[in-house]
Amino acid sequence: MVLRPQWEWRFDGADTEPVSSPVSPVFTTQYDAEQWLGEHWRTLAAQGVHAVRLLHEGTQATPTLTLPYT
């Protein structure tokens, strides 16, 4: 059985606490995860997400990014 790497976004609200919704898809590459964010950040911001963190296998892999307000 081949285990594939898992990349996913965690979303923070205005209070810097993680939000339970929306939920990130799980990606097999960092590129795919970043491309998805580039396509969906406006929708996420409209849903109250203020910052995002990319996790690789559960460990933060990139600095926290603040989303611009839409």
Image (tube, grey):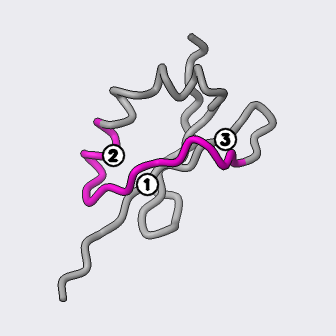
Q: Is residue 38 above or below residue 31?
A: above
Q: Is residue 23 above or below residue 58?
A: above
Callout 3–callout 2 Cβ contact below 8 Å: no
Q: CA distance from mark 3 to mark 1?
A: 13 Å
Q: Secondary structure at mark 3?
A: strand
Determine if the magenta segment contains residue 57: no
Seen at 34% across and 40% down, the residue is: 34
Q: Name the residue carrying label 1.
A: 8
Seen at 69% across and 48% down, the residue is: 18
Residue 12's disc number: 3
Q: Quadrant of the C terminus?
A: top right
Q: Secondary structure at mark 1?
A: strand
Magenta residues (range) = 18-35
On the image, the x and y values in percent for residue 68 come to 56, 17
Q: Quadrant of the N terminus?
A: bottom left
Q: Name the residue carrying label 2.
A: 33
Determine if the magenta segment contains residue 28: yes
| Residue nearest the viewer, comparing 26 with 30 | 26
Callout 2–callout 1 Cβ contact below 8 Å: yes
On the image, the x and y values in percent for residue 37 come to 39, 34
Seen at 47% across and 48% down, the residue is: 24
